[in-house]
Every structure is written in C-alpha cells, then in structure tokens.
Amino acid sequence: QVQLVESGGGLVQPGGSLRLSCTASTFTLDYYVIGWFRQAPGKAREGLSCVSRRNRSFYYADSVKGRFTIFRDNGKNTVYLQMNSLKPDDTAVYYCATECAASAVDYWGQGTQVTVSS
C-alpha cells in the first residue's frame, strides 16, 4: 500500500493561513496523482483539490476555489496545500492520497487536524 504522511495542521484564526504537507519516503510523488481531502465530524469525506502527474492539470472543489492552492516541490518530494482565508467551516482532518476520488482510496493515513476558531 502507498503510504503518505500529512502534516502542517493546527489552530488558526478565521482569515488566517496554513500550509499542509504531504510526503512519502518510499516513492516519488511526481509520478502520481495527488489529492487532498478533508473530513469534518459527522460529515462525509470531501475531495478538495487534485494535481495530475507532472502538474498537467489541477482540480479545486467550489468550496475552496480561490482560497486553496495545491503545488509540488519535487526537490522535497512533497505536495503542499496552501490554505488562505480560512473559515470555521474549514475545520476538519485533512488527508492526502494518490487518487483524486475519495471512493478510489484504499488506505487513509492519519491525517492532520485543522481547526479554525477565534
């Protein structure tokens, strides 16, 4: 199974920013589609953003379009999710995976908690 590690979450005030990281130690992320997802308590897991192999295409959910940006740093074998203008509704556990659709993911990592609160 493909193992990814998410990090960078935390507590931030509304309007603030966070940058989440998705890394892997045993394979090269640039060869894979990478998606970011989140799950809030009592809600279904939501697909937020996805980047194709070699950055050929990008996808953003309407809920984050214009606020979140997905990008790769191949030198660090990391895919980031830059999150700006955060809202309390963005509070959730955030996950990354080598898929763009949550239904296609076989294994979820531990995720990273993002809490937006004043």
Image (spheres, rainbow, N blue to C red):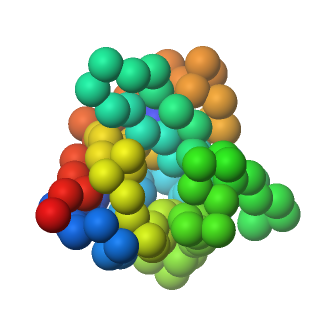
Residue 28 in the image: x percent, y percent? 55, 58
Tell me if residue 99 comes above or below residue 81 in the rendering: above
Look at the image and tell me whether residue 77 can be seen: no
Q: Position of residue 76 (x, y in %)?
A: 44, 76
Determine the residue located farthest toward the bottom in the rendered image. 75
| Residue 44 in the image, given as x and y percentages of width and height | 45, 21
The answer to whether one can see residue 42 in this image is: yes
18 or 2, which lies in front? Answer: 18
Q: How many marks?
A: 0
Direction front: furthest residue: 118
Q: Could you tell whether 22 is left or right of 54 in the image?
A: left
Q: What residue is shown at x 39% (from left), y 22% (from top)?
A: 43
In this view, the residue farthest toward the right is 56
In the image, residue 38 above or below residue 63: above
Location of the N terminus by quadrant is top left
Q: Nearer the viewer, residue 85 or 7?
A: 85
Name the foreground residue: 98 vs 46.
46
Image point (30%, 67%), residue name:
14
Left or right side of 32 for 18: left
Q: What residue is shown at x 15% (from left), y 64% (from top)? A: 118
**Residue 53 location in percent, x, y?**
74, 56
Q: Quadrant of residue 69?
A: bottom right
Up-down: is 97 above or below 118?
Answer: above
Q: Residue at x 25, y 57 (%)?
A: 116
